[in-house]
Amino acid sequence: MSHPSKHYLIVNHSASFDHIKARESLDAALILASYDMHVSLCFIGDGVFQTIAKQNAELIGAKDFIASFKALHFYDIEDIYVSETCLSERQLSGPSAFNDASLVTNSQITALIDAADVVLTF
């Protein structure tokens, strides 16, 4: 008997190296996807700092997990959303850690949350 896969939306609102939350979020995404769950990632608030390419974690003695984002497609995690408003508020632009992330509005984020079976926030 097979069970339908749930759709997990992982909402990231913590900056890259403020807490362990950002790393835990990535771990949760990879674990869920390894069990064939449909996983989407959304970056809002200070979480948009995680989307900056080429962060130098060694300067603060942290492990660089941002490079692991490149492995997401191996786990079929392809739905990646970044708040356009939060990027703008933090004056962020330029290269992203994701090649194919979608910039979304606040109303689109609300729709993503409503459509998910399970929402995890980190």
Image (cartoon, rainbow, N blue to C red):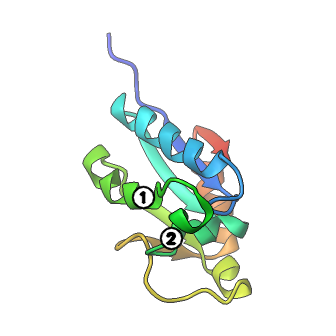
Mark with earlier residue (1, 2): 2
Q: In the picture shown, does residue 4 fall above or below 73?
A: above
Q: Quadrant of residue 87?
A: bottom right
Q: Which residue is mark 1?
A: 79
* Residue at point 43%, 33% (across, down): 31
Q: Quadrant of residue 79?
A: bottom left
Q: Which residue is more in the foreground, 75 or 55?
A: 55
Type of amino acid at the residue the image marks with label 1: Asp
* Residue at point 52%, 77% (across, down): 103
Percent coordinates x, y for residue 101 in the rendering: 43, 70
Query: Quick check: 106 left or right of 66?
Result: right
- Give the Cα distance between marks 1 and 2: 25 Å
Mark number for residue 56? 2
Q: Which residue is more in the foreground, 67 or 85?
A: 67
Type of amino acid at the residue the image marks with label 2: Asn
Query: Quick check: 59 left or right of 35?
Result: right
* Secondary structure of the residue carrying numbered label 2: loop
